Amino acid sequence: MDSEGAIGFSDFLIFAREFGKSVPLTVDRMNFPLRAISVSGNWGDTGYVVDQWEAAGRTGTLIPPDYIEWLESLHVNWICLSVALHYDDSMDSTVERVYSSDVGIRTFSDEALRQLIREFRSRDKRVF
């Protein structure tokens, strides 16, 4: 704290003098320019939406408009898409993507991933 490069008694005195004081935030968290959210796996509400899109012949939009509105309300500009991998047995080194609902967390199909990326990008969201 005293910039000597070692923790000494003078550092303790500075700490004791400043202990309990309030420090103003230097960054308004809601205006921070980088906000990200993750869309993980293909389960729960995400799985339901993807299933509807797949059943409709992969036509129309995949992302519900109210979801985009919610992202906008949070000032999200980055979307993380994660792909789930499945293994049947921890003793077997085989890892695969499983699309069916037979497993706990299935993954997105390639077509659904491409559509998600297209739609997020068309709404000025960066995708990783």
Image (spheres, rainbow, N blue to C red):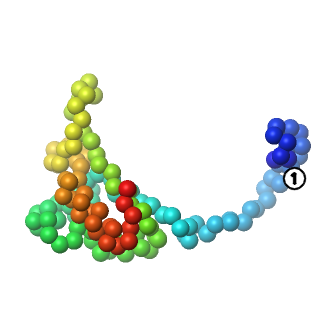
Residue 78, visible in the rendered structure: yes
* Image spot of residue 85 (x, y percent): 27, 42
Residue extending farthest to the top is 91
Question: Is disc 1 surrounded by few (<14), some (14 to 19) or many (20+) residues within 10 Å?
Answer: few
Residue found at x 74% / y 62%: 23
Residue found at x 85% / y 47%: 2
Q: Looking at this view, is 62 or 113 the one in front?
A: 113
* Image spot of residue 124 (x, y percent): 38, 71
Residue found at x 21% / y 59%: 112
- Above or below, 5 against 120 in this view is above
Residue found at x 44% / y 67%: 76
In the picture, the quarter occupied by the C terminus is bottom left
Amino acid type at mark 1 = Arg
- Count of numbered circles in the view: 1
Give residue 127's quadrant in the image.
bottom left
Q: Looking at this view, is 42 or 44 the one in front?
A: 42
Give residue 78's quadrant in the image.
bottom left
* In-image side of 81 versus 35 (left or right): left
- Above or below, 107 against 75 in this view is above
| Residue with the mark numbered 1 | 17
What secondary structure is found at the residue carrying circle 1? helix
Residue 70, visible in the rendered structure: no
Give residue 48's quadrant in the image.
bottom left
* In-image side of 19 versus 56 (left or right): right
* Image spot of residue 115 (x, y percent): 23, 63
* Image spot of residue 101 (x, y percent): 17, 48
